[in-house]
């Protein structure tokens, strides 16, 4: 009878749980060791870096929330896991990027939906972490990006060519002033996240932090669909 009620409690707890795929990035620390629980309650540890997105992880979001854990080492050297942060995830998404910022004792998180149509080689995703709007001027793309929002752009540039753009902030008279720029190498098997942040030394300027991630090139995907036998026969023609 007791096991019956335990089973009911487990089923009730999982009815509001949804499987979420995520990659993570930490902006203010070079490296973090975190953990997530799987459906059985087992903890899986993984590392989050400032220079690259973490490998894809899968966890259950219960009541629309992802719980990340951190290691708490006791004086005796025993490793315990404690809550690190809770991230709220929309029930309409299944894949996200978790951006961790702030101090280790008071971490913050920003959730960016990452649907398949935005996992494209050669694309740029720009995220404005400034407390004010930023103007963007890229080849074939102009936009005023509000604070805390992001935008997606697929440049019409040749593979292995260079692109460059300019950022602007507003001045007291209502106009816009140049606040910084970017220059990048266009690669059709790479997508790039650009994080726009205030310059710590000049409030009129912004800094830009780029994170690259390799994605399958469309032509490479077609090649991979060919069976080894067909590939060999074609190569011998």
Image (spheres, helix red, strand yellow):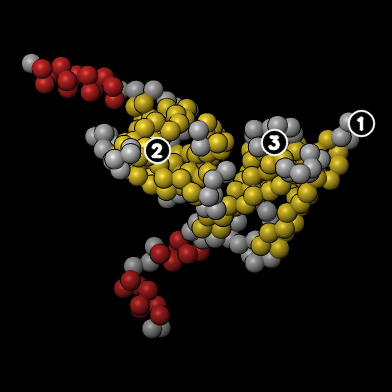
**Which residue is labeled 3 in the image?**
130
The numbered mark, 1 or 3, whose residue comes first in the sequence reads 3
Q: Residue at x 34, y 67 (%)?
A: 227
Q: How crowded is the residue under tag 2: few (<14 C-alpha within 10 Å), some, or many (20+)?
A: some
Q: CA distance from mark 1 to mark 3?
A: 20 Å
* Residue sitting nearer the eye, 121 or 173: 173
**Which quadrant holds the N terminus?**
top left
Whether residues under marks 2 and 3 lie with C-beta atoms below 8 angstroms apart, the answer is no
Q: Residue at x 64, y 67 (%)?
A: 160
- Give left or right: position of 78 versus 213: left
Q: CA distance from mark 2 to mark 3?
A: 27 Å
The numbered mark, 2 or 3, whose residue comes first in the sequence reads 2
Q: What x and y, as percent, mark residue 59?
A: 36, 37
- Give left or right: position of 205 versus 42: right
Q: Secondary structure at mark 2?
A: strand
Q: Which is closer to the viewer, label 2 or label 3?
A: 2
Q: How crowded is the residue under tag 3: few (<14 C-alpha within 10 Å), some, or many (20+)?
A: some
Q: Looking at this rendering, what residue extends furthest in the right direction?
A: 173
- Give left or right: position of 5 versus 123: left
Q: How crowded is the residue under tag 1: few (<14 C-alpha within 10 Å), some, or many (20+)?
A: few
Q: Secondary structure at mark 1?
A: loop
Q: Looking at this rendering, what residue extends furthest in the front direction?
A: 75
Q: Which is closer to the viewer, label 2 or label 1?
A: 2
**Which residue is labeled 2 in the image?**
70
Q: CA distance from mark 2 to mark 1?
A: 47 Å
Badge number at residue 173: 1
Above-or-below relation of 100 to 139: above
Any part of residue 158 in sight: no
């Amino acid at each position: 009878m007791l096991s019956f009620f335990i089973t009911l409690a487990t089923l009730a707890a999982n009815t509001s749980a949804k499987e979420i795929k995520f990659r993570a990035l930490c902006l203010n620390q070079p490296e973090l060791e975190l953990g997530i629980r799987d459906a059985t309650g087992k903890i899986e540890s993984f590392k989050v870096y400032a220079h690259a997105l973490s490998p894809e992880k899968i966890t259950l979001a219960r009541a629309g929330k992802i719980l990340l854990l951190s290691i708490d080492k006791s004086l005796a050297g025993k490793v315990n896991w404690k809550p690190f942060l809770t991230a709220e995830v929309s029930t309409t998404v299944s894949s996200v990027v978790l951006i961790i910022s702030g101090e280790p004792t008071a971490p913050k998180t920003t959730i960016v939906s990452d649907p398949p149509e935005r996992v494209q080689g050669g694309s740029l995703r720009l995220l404005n972490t400034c407390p004010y709007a930023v103007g963007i001027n890229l080849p074939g793309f102009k936009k005023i990006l509000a604070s805390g929002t992001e935008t997606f752009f697929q440049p019409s540039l040749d593979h292995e060519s260079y692109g460059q753009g300019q950022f602007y902030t507003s001045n007291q008279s209502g106009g816009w002033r140049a606040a910084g720029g970017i220059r990048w190498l266009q690669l059709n098997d790479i997508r790039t996240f650009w994080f726009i942040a205030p310059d710590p030394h000049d409030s009129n300027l912004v800094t830009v932090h780029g994170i690259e991630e390799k994605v399958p090139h469309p032509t490479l995907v077609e090649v991979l669909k060919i069976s080894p036998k067909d590939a060999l026969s074609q190569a011998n023609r």
